Image: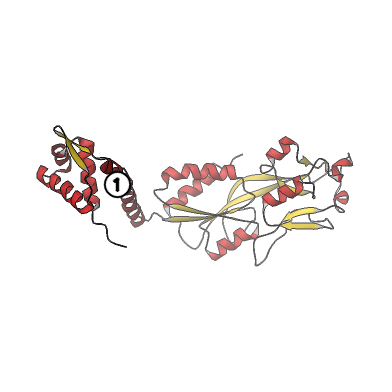
């Protein structure tokens, strides 16, 4: 790849000529001589092989090619400025990236609110967001691949910040045989029906969560698949209420009338990597996650 023939400073000079109405005005703003500014633009045209300005009366105006190139150069200079700012921020201890690992059951709306609030404060810091289930989040913390982690598991050896809990509800399609019994249900009623469960994404010590007393279980890898199976009448499941709010309101899912255990509150916790100090961006994001964790 060839090195650019035109420098950022040359593009900055052309922008000044256009934005301030002429060579003399640009020279004043840039604290340079008018002849220096004129030479810079002339040299640019020679290097690019394309006329950028033309004289209309006593004023230099952009050619069609010059207007197109100037538009692109504005993006180029903005990105260069952001790159230099990011380098300065990193030199001040600001992170280039935050690794955030979240239990898949955590409400996307709460997370999106925190990330939206973080964006204008991020100073170019990227967020790598990863979803896991149950012990999968814990493994990311232990592996050091998570700077921040949201989990429903109380992880030994860490000091968590408690977030608002989430509600799991037992649901099935309205025409499921359990609903057709048209009475209060016990766990004995569930045993002979298919339960849909979500697989723990951890590999070392996967956990089971919730009631698993059904004789037949189908295990899937994510919430969306579990929801779709239950919506189509293929079983029952405990699913996060926020995740299935639309299906409940439409009537494609219905809460099972269990005498006990129809609802289960799951605590959620925010953890930080204990093996390295939190940088300023990570601290800001952590505070925003806590602030947006309310119902």
Name the residue tied to disc 1. 73
Left or right placement of residue 35 versus residue 184 in this view: left
In the displayed structure, would residue 4 be above or below residue 203? above
The local secondary structure at tag 1 comes to: helix
Residue 3: image quadrant is bottom left
Left or right placement of residue 97 versus residue 183 in this view: left
Q: Quadrant of the N terminus?
A: bottom left
Q: Position of residue 172 (x, y in %)?
A: 79, 45
In the displayed structure, would residue 117 be above or below residue 269? above
Q: How is the image coloured?
A: secondary structure
Q: Nearer the viewer, residue 81 or 113?
A: 81
Residue 112: image quadrant is top right
Q: Position of residue 259 (x, y in %)?
A: 84, 43
Q: Position of residue 194 (x, y in %)?
A: 82, 53
Residue visible at 76% across and 53% down in the picture:
196
Residue visible at 20% across and 41% down in the picture:
53
Residue visible at 31% across and 51% down in the picture:
80
Q: Residue furthest bottom?
A: 204
Count of numbered marks: 1
Q: Residue furthest top?
A: 57
Q: Quadrant of the C terminus?
A: top right
Q: Nearer the viewer, residue 178 or 225?
A: 225
Q: Position of residue 76 (x, y in %)?
A: 32, 49
Q: Nearer the viewer, residue 88 or 221?
A: 221
Question: How dense is the environment of label 1, judged by Cα within 10 Å: few (below 14), some, or many (20 and up)?
Answer: some
């Amino acid at each position: 790849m060839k090195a650019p023939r035109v420098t950022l400073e040359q593009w900055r000079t052309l922008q000044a000529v256009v934005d301030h109405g002429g060579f003399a005005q640009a020279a004043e703003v840039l604290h340079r001589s008018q002849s220096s500014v004129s030479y810079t633009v002339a040299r640019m045209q020679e290097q690019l092989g394309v006329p950028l300005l033309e004289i209309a009366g006593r004023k230099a105006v952009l050619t069609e090619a010059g207007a197109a190139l100037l538009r692109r150069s504005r993006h180029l200079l903005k990105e260069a400025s952001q790159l230099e700012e990011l380098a300065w921020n990193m030199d001040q201890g600001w992170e280039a990236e935050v690794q955030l690992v979240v239990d898949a059951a955590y409400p996307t709306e709460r997370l999106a609110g925190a990330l939206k609030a973080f964006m204008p404060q991020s100073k170019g810091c990227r967020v790598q967001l990863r979803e896991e289930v149950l012990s999968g989040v814990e493994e990311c913390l232990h592996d050091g691949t998570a700077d921040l982690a949201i989990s429903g598991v109380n992880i030994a050896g860490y000091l968590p910040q408690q977030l608002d809990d989430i509600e799991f509800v037992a649901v099935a399609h309205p025409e499921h045989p359990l609903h057709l019994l048209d009475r209060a249900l016990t766990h004995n009623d569930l045993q002979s029906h298919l339960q849909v469960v979500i697989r723990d994404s951890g590999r070392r010590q996967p956990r089971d969560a919730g009631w698993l007393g059904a004789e037949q279980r189908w295990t899937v890898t994510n919430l969306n698949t579990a929801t779709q199976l239950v919506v189509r009448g293929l079983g029952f499941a405990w699913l996060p209420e926020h995740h299935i709010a639309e299906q409940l309101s439409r009537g494609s899912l219905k809460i099972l009338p269990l005498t006990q255990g129809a609802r289960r509150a799951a605590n959620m916790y925010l953890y930080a990597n204990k093996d390295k100090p939190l940088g300023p961006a990570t601290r800001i994001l952590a505070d925003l996650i806590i602030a947006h964790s309310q119902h």
